[in-house]
Amino acid sequence: MCKLSGGSLRFLQLKRALGPISQRMLTRTLKKLERVAAVARTSTGSAGMPVIYSLTVEGTELLEALHGLSSWLRKHGYPVADKEDDRDEAGRFA
């Protein structure tokens, strides 16, 4: 969701911006975010044309809430992994 806070992205742009993530995992995650109305999916035309993803109003509100939670966790001494440097070899947050 953070990658979409700067504006809409096509699927492949989003995949590249996220780093090591499989197409299947990204697709599943985006579908879940669509179901909870955090992300909007817009088809730009017929089959084979790019699909654009963007944050909805609800997604923006959720992202703001998550940033607040992250700040609270840091303030109270809890570790928060939020950078690619914090990932292990498999791409998971350590």
Image (cartoon, grey):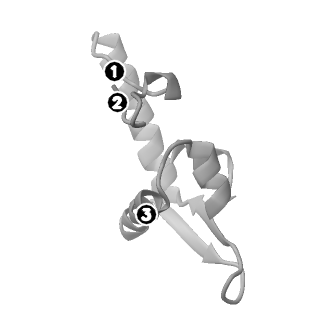
Residue plotted at (36% across, 64% down): 32
Q: Which x, y percent locates residue 77?
A: 28, 10
Give the SS element for disc 3. helix
Mark 2–mark 1 distance (CA, rounded to whole Å): 5 Å
Observer-side mark, 3 or 2, equals: 3
Which residue type carries mark 1? Trp
Mark 2–mark 1 contact, CB under 8 Å? yes
Q: Is residue 40 left or right of residue 66?
A: right
Residue plotted at (67% across, 45% down): 6
Which residue type carries mark 3? Arg
Q: Which x, y percent locates residue 74?
A: 36, 15
When asked about the image quadrant of residue 92, the answer is top left
Residues 68 and 23: in front is: 23
Residues 24 and 52: in front is: 24
Q: Is residue 92 above or below residue 27?
A: above
Which mark, by number, is residue 24? Answer: 3
Q: Which residue is mark 2?
A: 69
Q: Which residue is mark 1?
A: 72
